[in-house]
Image (cartoon, rainbow, N blue to C red):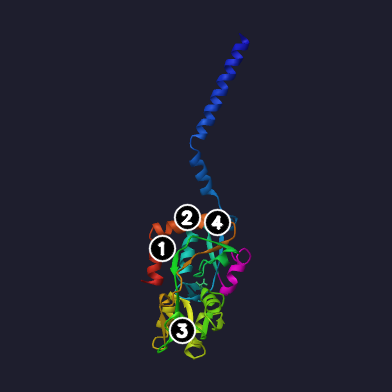
Amino acid sequence: MKKFLAILLATVMTMSLLTACGGKDAAPADVASSEADAAVSEVLADGVLTVGTNAEFPPFEYVGDSGEPDGFDVALIKAIGEKLGVSVEVENMEFDSLVSSIGNKIDVAIAGMTVTDERKNSVDFSNSYYDALQYVIVPEGSEIATFDDLAGKAIGVQLGTTGDFIASDDVDGASVSQYNKAVDAVNDLINGRVDCVIIDKNPALVFESKFAGQVKAIDGAQFDFEVEDYAIALPKGDAVLADQINKALDELKADGTFDKLVEEYIGQ
Ligand code: ARG
């Protein structure tokens, strides 16, 4: 009898234990997703996101009246930092050093940076946040109008940009002048030292209106350039950070902040 009671007791205990486990197991998806929500990249553990940019690329980044980097990208990454609950420190550096500085001098880079396979060897990218295209800036009256016209020309570019890769790798016989600042390339265009400048659409339009009457910006579609995607460059392999940044980006799109920034900084 004692033995029977003991077995009964053991059975009841086992059953209640199982039920308790069952209760926990009942919502495995919830548990998993709240754990994922709670995951914070080590990069953010100090409460600061250090962001590299190259503030020579209006309207995405430029040095504002206060002497600090400003522009669409700067406003966007600050809004992302707010969503992530960290403060954002922006470091202005040369465009060509951004990718190699991720993981040492800076945590991430936002710089109207085009996603390329080559860069993907060194960094990961967030989801893309803007479509871009290379444009060609020429002096008023220039006869350059198609890709074939670029052959053998003196072309100004910003060092290490996709415009540089087109001029240096794709155009036959071009002599390419690489500048650290895009505006220096445009100044040399005005001085007659180069025949054209290849640069992304929105900065090309800004320079066209800044130097109105001297230069014009030609749509890259006329040159059959490929559409490019801008994304935030991230340390390679930090899936948690990528997830957190992509989520913040999604939220900013859903709540209208993203469109407000486009309207404020880029227009159209
Ligand atoms: N989209 C081009 C690239 O990724 C040019 C970006 C230049 N950006 C800058 N902030 N200067 O190569």
- Residue 82 appears left or right of 255: right
Neighbourhood count class around disc 1 (C-alpha, 10 Å): few under 14, some 14–19, many 20 upward: many
Label whose residue precedes the other's in the sequence (1 or 2): 2
Q: Quadrant of the C terminus?
A: bottom left
Q: CA distance from mark 3 to mark 2?
A: 44 Å
Q: Which residues are magenta?
A: 91-106
Q: Is residue 58 magenta?
A: no
Closer to viewer: mark 3 or mark 1: 3
Q: Give me the C-alpha separation between circle 4 and circle 3.
A: 44 Å
Q: Earlier in the sequence, mark 3 or mark 1?
A: 3
- Secondary structure at badge 4 equals helix
**Circle 4 is placed at which residue position?**
241
Circle 3 SS class: helix
Which residue matches tag 3?
149
At x 63%, y 65%, the residue is: 104
Left or right, 106 with reference to 208: right
Residue at image coords 50%, 73%:
69
User: Whole-Å distance between the Cαs marked 1 and 2?
Assistant: 13 Å
Q: Earlier in the sequence, mark 4 or mark 1?
A: 4
Q: Is mark 3 within 8 Å of ligand 1?
A: no
Nearer the viewer's eye, disc 4 or disc 3? 3
Q: Is residue 185 above or below residue 243?
A: below
In what quadrant of the picture does the N terminus appear? top right
Residue 164: which quarter of the image? Answer: bottom right
Q: Position of residue 177 (x, y in %)?
A: 56, 84
Disc 3 marks which amino acid? Answer: Asp
Q: Nearer the viewer, residue 206 or 76?
A: 206
97 magenta-colored? yes
Kindly identify the amino acid type of the residue bearing the numbered disc 4: Leu
Name the element at disc 2: helix
